[in-house]
Image (cartoon, rainbow, N blue to C red):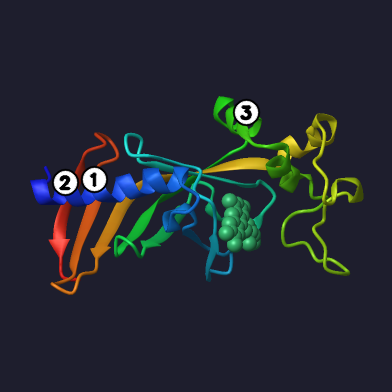
């Protein structure tokens, strides 16, 4: 059970995340996603938050299935960091990652993306592959051009959804009257959140 003030803090967090997914001007639209490399080192990157669901406690991102982060994250631990300067609120979310390459959810996301967005997945090699000279890795005929549907058929196999199942939220609000920090934990079986105030 959460006290009313903790409920309000958790509500604020999910409201910012849900709004951040829809509003490209929100700083929460581009959080940092952290993983651990096979060598055990921390790694992070900016990603566009495509959807957030408080009900399911998930965050959705789009990425290239061939990228090293997919192998590093799939079915493993993930950490997401967002800061909203206007609200003076930092959110540190941790949970487990799921990389989805098949099924209705991904087909829906693929069809809902513009051809220009889908073009990213036409790169001829995996993200991070060495190049002899600076380049996008895209086939020359779509460089600076909108691809047609035929061009995009093969690209679909490179498209992946990264779903973050949020298990914990560290909530930090900065204020000159006194900072406030809370920690929230989601019970995986019931989906219920518990929380506590913490020293900032
Ligand atoms: C503003 C911004 C938004 C980005 N959005 C995404 C994204 O939605 N998906 C993605 O895979 N990479 C995105 N990137 C690129 C990643 O930060 C990263 O460079 C790339 O995915 C390779 O990461 P990896 O080597 O860890 O796989 C974005 C970069 C920036 C600067």
- For mark 1, does the 10 Å Cα neighbourhood hold few (<14), some (14 to 19), or many (20 or more) residues? few
Counting from the top left corner in percent of width and height, residue 31 is at 46, 58
At a point 12% along the width and 45% down the height, the residue shown is: 2
Q: At numbered mark 1, what does the secondary structure look like: helix, strand or loop? A: helix
At a point 48% along the width and 51% down the height, the residue shown is: 76
User: Residue 7 — which label?
Assistant: 2
Verify CB contact (< 8 Å) between mark 3 and mark 2. no
Mark sitting earlier along the chain (3/2): 2
| Residue at the spot of label 1 | 11
Marks 3 and 2 sit apart, C-alpha to C-alpha, by 35 Å
Q: At numbered mark 3, what does the secondary structure look like: helix, strand or loop? A: helix
At a point 37% along the width and 55% down the height, the residue shown is: 94
Is residue 69 visible to us here?
no
| Residue at the spot of label 3 | 107
Quadrant of ligand 1: it is bottom right
Instruction: Specify whether tag 1 is near ligand 1 (CB below 8 Å).
Output: no
- For mark 3, does the 10 Å Cα neighbourhood hold few (<14), some (14 to 19), or many (20 or more) residues? some
Which of labels 3 and 1 is toward the front? 1
Q: At numbered mark 2, what does the secondary structure look like: helix, strand or loop? A: helix
Q: Residue furthest left?
A: 3
């Amino acid at each position: 059970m959460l006290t009313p003030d903790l409920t309000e803090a958790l509500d604020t967090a999910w409201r910012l995340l849900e709004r951040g997914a829809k509003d490209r001007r929100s700083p929460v639209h581009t959080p940092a996603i952290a993983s651990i490399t096979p060598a055990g080192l921390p790694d992070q990157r900016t990603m566009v938050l495509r959807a957030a669901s408080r009900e399911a406690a998930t965050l959705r991102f789009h990425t290239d299935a061939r990228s090293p982060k997919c192998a590093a994250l799939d079915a493993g631990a993930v950490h997401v960091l967002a800061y909203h300067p206007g609200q003076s609120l930092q959110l540190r979310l941790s949970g487990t990652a799921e990389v989805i390459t098949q099924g209705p959810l991904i087909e829906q996301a693929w069809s809902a993306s513009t051809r220009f967005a889908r073009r990213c997945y036409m790169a001829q090699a995996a993200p991070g592959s060495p190049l002899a000279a600076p380049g996008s890795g895209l086939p020359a005929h779509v460089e600076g051009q909108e691809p047609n549907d035929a061009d995009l058929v093969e690209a679909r196999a490179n498209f992946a959804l990264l779903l973050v199942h949020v298990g914990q939220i560290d909530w930090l609000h900065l204020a000159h009257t006194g900072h406030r920090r809370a920690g929230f934990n989601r019970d995986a079986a019931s989906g219920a959140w518990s929380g506590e105030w913490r020293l900032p």
